[in-house]
Amino acid sequence: MKWWVVAVVVAVVRTADAAAAGHPLTIDLQMRNAARVPAHVLEESQDEVTRIFARAGIAVRWTETAPRFTVQIVTQVLGFDRAASPVMGVALRKGGDCTAQVFFRQVQDFSRAYHVDLGRMLAYVIAHEIGHLLLPGYKHSPTGVMQADWDKAVVRDAAKGSLTFTEAQAAIIRASR
């Protein structure tokens, strides 16, 4: 069974010290938890998102004020007839707002189906959707966190914490400053 990650929404926030880590780019993210995800799961996912971006040379600062991106966790996919939709998130730009919308029920189902930690899976979906907001043209790639089709191999890499942005993607994001 393959699952797809679709881009259409973006927004995020938590603090990683960019100056101490020497990162040239810091992105501010804000988390909005409309799905009532347990606090420990959100905290784990925020920490993992921070690590994913740090590996690409980008610092993440989670904040409640003036975020560059907002991450909105909602219960389920809107506009899809079936609850088992493979779409786990979308990246949206509307005016000056960039939001990554993550469909918690789909992430939860995917996490259960593949026996992956929920906080970690949530983090990779968030990172993927933020990637769509940071990369020109909302592009998918054949490898790394920006793959469109998430299968067992991708999930295995995510479970190990080794799913990353490609070096080319990281360079584009860092240059977009």
Image: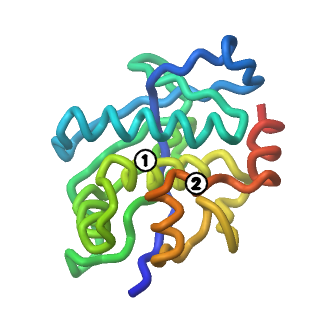
The x and y percentages for residue 32 are: 31, 35
The x and y percentages for residue 144 are: 64, 62
Instruction: Check disc 2 and give the amino acid type.
Output: Ser
Q: Residue at x 65, y 60 (%)?
A: 138
The residue positioned farthest toward the bottom in the image shown = 1
Question: From the image, which quarter does the C terminus lie in?
Answer: top right
Question: From the image, which quarter does the N terminus lie in?
Answer: bottom left
Q: 92 or 123, which lies in front?
A: 123
Q: 41 or 141, which lies in front?
A: 41
In 3D space, how far apart are the residues under numbered discs 1 and 2 (Cα atoms)? 12 Å
Q: Residue at x 34, y 37 (%)?
A: 44
Between circles 1 and 2, the one closer to the viewer is 2
Residue under label 1, please give it. Answer: 123
Mark 2, other Cα within 10 Å: few <14 / some 14–19 / many ≥20 = some
The x and y percentages for residue 128 are: 54, 55
Q: Residue at x 52, y 74 (%)?
A: 153
- Please, what secondary structure does the residue beneath circle 1 have? helix
Label 1 or label 2, whichever comes before in sequence order = 1
Q: Is residue 74 left or right of residue 134?
A: left
The residue positioned farthest toward the front in the image shown = 160
Q: Is residue 162 left or right of residue 49?
A: right
**Is residue 54 depicted above or below 107 in this figure?**
above
Residue under label 2, please give it. Answer: 162
Q: Where on the picture, by quarter, is residue 81?
A: bottom left
- Please, what secondary structure does the residue beneath circle 2 have? loop
Instruction: Check disc 1 and give the amino acid type.
Output: Ala
Q: Residue at x 52, y 46 (%)?
A: 94
Residue 135 badge: none
